[in-house]
Image (spheres, grey):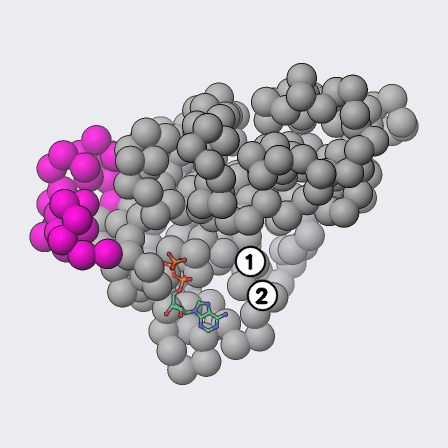
Amino acid sequence: MTLQTPKLSAQNVSVHYGAKQAVRDVSITMSMDEVTAFIGPSGCGKSTFLRTLNRMNDTIPSAKVSGEILLDGEDIYAPSMDVVQLRARVGMVFQKPNPFPKSIFENVAYGPRIHGLASGRAELGEIVERSLKRAGLWDEVKDRLDDSGTALSGGQQQRLCIARAIAVDPEVILMDEPCSALDPIATARIEELIADLRGKYAIVIVTHNMQQAARVSQRTAFFHLGELVEYGLTDEIFTAPRQPRTKDYITGRYG
Ligand SMILES: Nc1ncnc2c1ncn2[C@@H]1O[C@H](COP(=O)(O)OP(=O)(O)OP(=O)(O)O)[C@@H](O)[C@H]1O
């Protein structure tokens, strides 16, 4: 299976929480041009593996990661890697929208400001506007940028979190079940947004919802008991899975 533009590559990645192994020897390469979906039953290690891709597991003391993860060929676990910089390059959107308790403007401006991406107030304003437009939220909030981000609806808050990730000009966006707290209309908006963002960023999405994986992704990885069982074109995974475990899962036999 050849990818057009390899962006992020994991080689033999395992994760332990203390003595318990949550991810087993996963090797996978994700492309710039595609949305990659991680699917699998609860507890199979999807979120744990996703978090290795921008070193979010560093924040969990019992978590130990082995193997190698390369971003454009560069080892993200190398001692020379600046983790703050890495998390700007590989942004993350969580299950529950988590805007800062600050204004809409500040939610988006915070990252570019600490990373020194704007030379002044006007440029910062442009970045905020561009990011909110790209996240499909500008028209709804442009007249109330000083209102609190936490006063928005759940779906708007999630788009604000996406705008916040976009504002620091990431290369990869990781999304951990980004719609699980949203209603169907807000979910549809996020799915449209993912389609719009495809190609601008490498996008990796963990989802419990197989229809969502089929709608938004071009490539799907099926995890089970910490292993990557099968990885391939989404159309093929859903219509002609090669592994019996994948077939059982997508036909609803377990999970
Ligand atoms: N912080 C942690 N400390 C200890 N064990 C953990 C921790 N986080 C996850 N685990 C365990 O690691 C395994 C994988 O969990 P993970 O959350 O990665 O799975 P998942 O596939 O994302 O599940 P879900 O779909 O329910 O979110 C599970 O057995 C879980 O209990």
Res 10 visible: yes
On screen, residue 53 above or below 220: below
Total marks placed: 2
Q: Residue 43 in the image: state x and y as whole percent.
A: 35, 63
Q: Mark 1–mark 2 contact, CB under 8 Å?
A: yes
Q: Residue 224 in the image: state x and y as whole percent.
A: 25, 59
Q: Residue 90 in the image: state x and y as whole percent.
A: 57, 44
Q: Residue 225 in the image: state x and y as whole percent.
A: 27, 65
Q: For the N terminus, give its image quadrant.
A: top left
Q: Residue at x 50, y 31 (%)?
A: 186
Relative depth, front residue between 97 and 229: 97
Check disc 2 and report the residue beneath it. 58
Which residue reaches farthest right? Answer: 120
Q: Residue at x 46, y 28 (%)?
A: 185
Q: Residues within 10 Å of mark 2 (few under 14, many from 20)?
A: some
Res 29 visible: no
Check disc 1 and report the residue beneath it. 55
Q: Residue at x 46, y 36 (%)?
A: 183
Relative depth, front residue between 48 and 70: 48
> Mark 2 is on which residue type?
Asp
Label 2 secondary element: helix
Q: Which residues are magenta?
A: 231-255
Residue 35 in which image quadrant: top left
Which residue reaches farthest bottom? Answer: 19
Q: Quarter containing ligand 1?
A: bottom left
> Mark 1 is on which residue type?
Arg
Q: For the C terminus, give its image quadrant.
A: bottom left
Q: Is residue 233 magenta?
A: yes
Q: Residue at x 65, y 55 (%)?
A: 83
**Within 8 Å: ligand 1 and the Cβ of disc 2?**
no
Q: Is residue 244 magenta?
A: yes
